[in-house]
Image (spheres, rainbow, N blue to C red):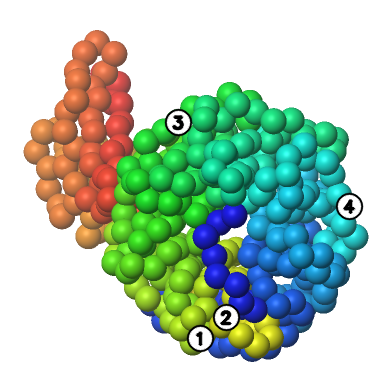
Amino acid sequence: MIPARTAAALIASSCWGAPAADLTWQLETGAALDSAFEVAWGDGTFVLVSETGEIARSADAETWSLVRDADDIALQGLAFGDGRFVAGGGNGSILTSADGIAWAPEASGTTDYINGVAYGGGLWVAVGGSTAGAGGFVLTSDGDGVWTARDDGGAPFLAKVAYGAGRFVAVGQQGTLITSTDGVDWVAADSKTGFYLTGLTYADGWFVGVGQRGTVIRSRDGLTWQRGNIPVGAWLYGVTFAGGTWIVAGDSGATFVSTDFATWTAAPTGADGEAIFYAAVAAAGQVVVVGSPSGGEAVVARTEAPVPPPAAPPLSIRRVPPEGGLGERVAVGYLLEPGGPIWSAVNLSFSEDLATWSGLGVAPQLVSSGADGDFYEAVDPLPVADGSLRSYRAEFLP
């Protein structure tokens, strides 16, 4: 079972609109259940699962209906895929539903905790571990109700799993990170941390994991990872992406936002300082984080969420027809109208001989020359989100 404290449910949601640093959460009542460990969105419906086995659903993350009563078996994993929700929890519990209302059990073949569930590539994967210290496990199903145990390479307790870029990634205790392209064969990867990893998602072309002591990690391919950190001592559990902004949530009712993965800004929810946010999802024009306050009934918090930053126009290299008595020129600059004739004068360079360049833009460099033509390359001076520079290459035939 993922490290947690017991309390009542807390939900925070937001609507698109405000810059990342200006998130203002408003707490409201109405979540229908007294705890919340995971949230998912699918087929027009938000679904919550709780530490007592309760399940609630909502079309707008504001008004919730209880659809399953407590049975004292915690539900901690939840995902939507292939037209259905799948939830996992204590005693090896697996429940499935096509509408978020009627839930049916499936036999998992284990009596240990199922903490994370994900769908991708036509396959369901569930991960978890033994509270008796026997380590972690991986289960897979193709959706036929049959779950098969897979060799996880001796991984310790696994907390969450996500799918993206053609592979599954699972994280857990001691910075454990394992990955698989088919759900069957798993290999370990270096997460760059020894801290417990408790949350994981794939969005905007990145896997992002969070965990103990403000740990944040990310990877494009699930194999090579970079480590970041939010300078707090708190556990982080939930992570999601919306409007060009990463949102993470955890202990003390805290949420943090970042557009570059390097600088993180606190975005207080106004929740009780004893609150714990366990999960986050971005869907239907909202960001929703869920968890448990120190007492009382379930609550909902809403705010305007981040607006995507404007995309930089593409840097291009192309020939420019003769104009004003000048011979043929080559121009490098930003197209304000993709594929069109409008150029940004601020970022434009011209040359008539491919050697001498004028203007305020980027002067490309000759990369190679031969019978097949000349190759020039220009490096975009504006870094992309991960801090790298984009390069563009053009060929000019003899």
Report helix, strand or loop for mark 3.
strand
- What separation in Å lies between label 1 and label 3 (alpha carbons)? 38 Å
Q: In this view, does 295 lie to the left or right of 368?
A: right
Residue 66 spot, x, y in % from top left: 82, 74
Vertical relation: 395 (above or below) 217: above
Q: Earlier in the sequence, mark 3 or mark 4?
A: 4
Q: Earlier in the sequence, mark 1 or mark 4?
A: 4
Q: Are marks 1 and 4 in contact (CB under 8 Å)?
A: no
Report helix, strand or loop for mark 1.
loop
* Kind of residue at disc 2: Pro
Question: Which of the labelled discs sits on residue 213, or is there none?
Answer: none
Q: Are marks 4 and 2 in contact (CB under 8 Å)?
A: no
Residue 265 spot, x, y in % from top left: 34, 73
Judging by the rendered image, the residue that carries numbered circle 3 is: 188
Question: Which of the labelled discs sits on residue 104, or is there none?
Answer: 4
Q: Is residue 67 left or right of residue 242?
A: right
* Kind of residue at disc 1: Asp
* Kind of residue at disc 3: Ala
Q: Which of 152 and 117 is in front in this view?
A: 152
- What separation in Å lies between label 1 and label 4 (alpha carbons)? 35 Å
Q: Earlier in the sequence, mark 1 or mark 3?
A: 3
Does the image show residue 345?
Answer: yes
Q: In this view, does 42 lie to the left or right of 158?
A: right
Q: Are marks 1 and 3 in contact (CB under 8 Å)?
A: no
Report helix, strand or loop for mark 2.
loop
Judging by the rendered image, the residue that carries numbered circle 2 is: 293
Judging by the rendered image, the residue that carries numbered circle 1 is: 272
Mark 3 surroundings: few (<14), some (14-19) or many (≥20) residues within 10 A: some
At x 52%, y 60%, the residue is 3
Does the image show residue 302?
Answer: no
At x 84%, y 70%, the residue is 69
